[in-house]
Image (cartoon, rainbow, N blue to C red):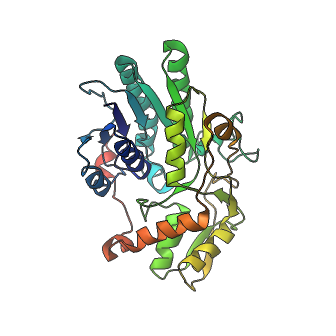
């Protein structure tokens, strides 16, 4: 039985990719330090007999006994509310963590896939965004800690591929949603649904004309799975190109939740992208992948998940205060 190491296994995407491999009869070793991950997600995975878990920060040296056939590096804060509070840890997991995992892949002769992001394109001047676009990123802005961590991650991954002949994959993930998202992670979809469920007005930052393209998590995982087992080594976009303005998206959430709250507007944060839409021609051509789940269906599944949360979870404002992580 093949064995897979998934970092960030306690997170939203990491838990879903771990579950997919378990369902495909792989042994899965999950790794996470719970800086933004959830013990709830690990509890779900632990019901599988082929799942084992190590609590560890991948920014530190990684020692794993036995063979590892595949490594999927998903460990990283992924929402602005997190990486603005823990900027150094965000940079470290994208740089030191990636270096450690590439070294492990080299030692174990593993295939490694790293989770990059559409944020490598920054606030794009090209629309939609193709993989050959170099981006428009402010490296010293508040968001730069995440954008540049991921850009460095891609650079060192390609260096290991070219210099050490390591079999590497890079997925550029666009906005993704679905069950197990943190309600309080600051991203627009859980923020809107949480506000609607609590009877609060929906908050839009900026004028609401900015766009996003939302991909349901099952579609994303299918694309990642296809990429891992492909022969393609350059970065590839995985996302849903069905673009929508934030204004229209807020109206969809109000309709979905049968809410009559108002929409209020606040200033747009610095360097927040105004456009986001993937060009997925490469994924379609090379991986024979296209998203299947329409936004209406995916939102209903996600809304049902959020409705299942306890009142305490619904009103919890902060994931954690990160004090124990801000010493270094």
Q: Is residue 110 left or right of residue 251?
A: left
Residue 88: percent from the left, percent from the top?
A: 43, 41
Number of marks in the image? 0
The image shows residue 318, relative to residue 29, as above or below, that is below
Residue 219: percent from the left, percent from the top?
A: 54, 51
Question: In the rendered image, which quarter is residue 75 located in?
Answer: top left
Q: Residue at x 55, y 16 (%)?
A: 162
Q: Is residue 180 left or right of residue 201?
A: left
Q: In the rendered image, is residue 137 in sight?
A: no
Q: Is residue 105 left or right of residue 327?
A: right
Q: In the rendered image, is residue 151 in sight?
A: yes
Question: In the rendered image, which quarter is residue 140 located in?
Answer: top right
Closer to the camera in the image, 279 or 36 = 279
Q: Residue at x 30, y 27 (%)?
A: 61
Question: In the rendered image, which quarter is residue 101 located in?
Answer: top left
Residue 95: percent from the left, percent from the top?
A: 45, 31
Of all residues, the one furthest to the bottom in this rendering is 260
Q: Residue at x 34, y 40 (%)?
A: 25
Quadrant placement of the N terminus: top left
The image shows residue 60, relative to residue 280, as above or below, that is above
Residue 327: percent from the left, percent from the top?
A: 31, 43
Of all residues, the one furthest to the right in this rendering is 126
Q: Residue at x 61, y 36 (%)?
A: 287
Quadrant placement of the C terminus: top left
The image shows residue 25, relative to residue 230, as above or below, that is below
């Amino acid at each position: 039985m093949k064995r897979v190491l998934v970092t960030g296994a306690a997170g939203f995407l990491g838990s879903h990719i771990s579950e997919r491999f378990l369902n495909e009869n792989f042994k899965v070793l999950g790794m996470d330090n719970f800086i933004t991950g959830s013990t709830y997600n690990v509890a779900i995975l632990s019901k599988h007999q082929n799942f084992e878990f190590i609590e560890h920060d991948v920014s530190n040296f990684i020692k794993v006994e036995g063979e590892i056939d595949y490594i999927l590096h998903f460990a990283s804060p992924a929402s602005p509310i997190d990486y603005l509070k823990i900027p150094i840890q965000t940079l470290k997991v994208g740089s030191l963590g990636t270096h450690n995992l590439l070294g492990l892949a080299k030692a174990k002769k593993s295939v490694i896939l790293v989770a990059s992001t559409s944020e490598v394109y920054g606030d794009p001047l090209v629309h939609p965004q193709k993989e050959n676009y170099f981006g428009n990123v402010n490296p010293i802005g508040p968001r730069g800690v995440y954008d540049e961590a991921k850009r460095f991650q891609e650079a060192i991954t390609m260096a290991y591929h070219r210099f050490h002949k390591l079999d590497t994959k890079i997925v550029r993930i666009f906005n993704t949603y679905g069950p197990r998202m943190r309600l309080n992670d600051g991203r627009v979809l859980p923020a809107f649904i949480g506000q609607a469920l609590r009877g609060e007005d929906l908050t839009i930052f900026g004028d609401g004309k900015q766009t996003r393209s939302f991909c349901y998590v099952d579609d994303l995982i299918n694309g990642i799975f296809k990429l891992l087992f492909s022969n393609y080594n350059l970065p590839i976009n995985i996302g849903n190109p069905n673009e929508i303005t934030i204004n229209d998206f807020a109206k969809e959430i109000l309709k979905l939740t049968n809410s009559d709250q108002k929409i209020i507007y606040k200033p747009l944060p610095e360097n927040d992208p105004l456009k986001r839409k993937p060009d997925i021609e490469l994924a379609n051509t090379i991986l024979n992948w296209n998203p299947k789940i329409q936004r209406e269906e995916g939102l209903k599944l996600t809304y049902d998940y959020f409705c299942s949360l306890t009142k305490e979870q619904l009103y919890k404002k902060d994931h954690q205060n990160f004090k124990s992580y801000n010493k270094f």
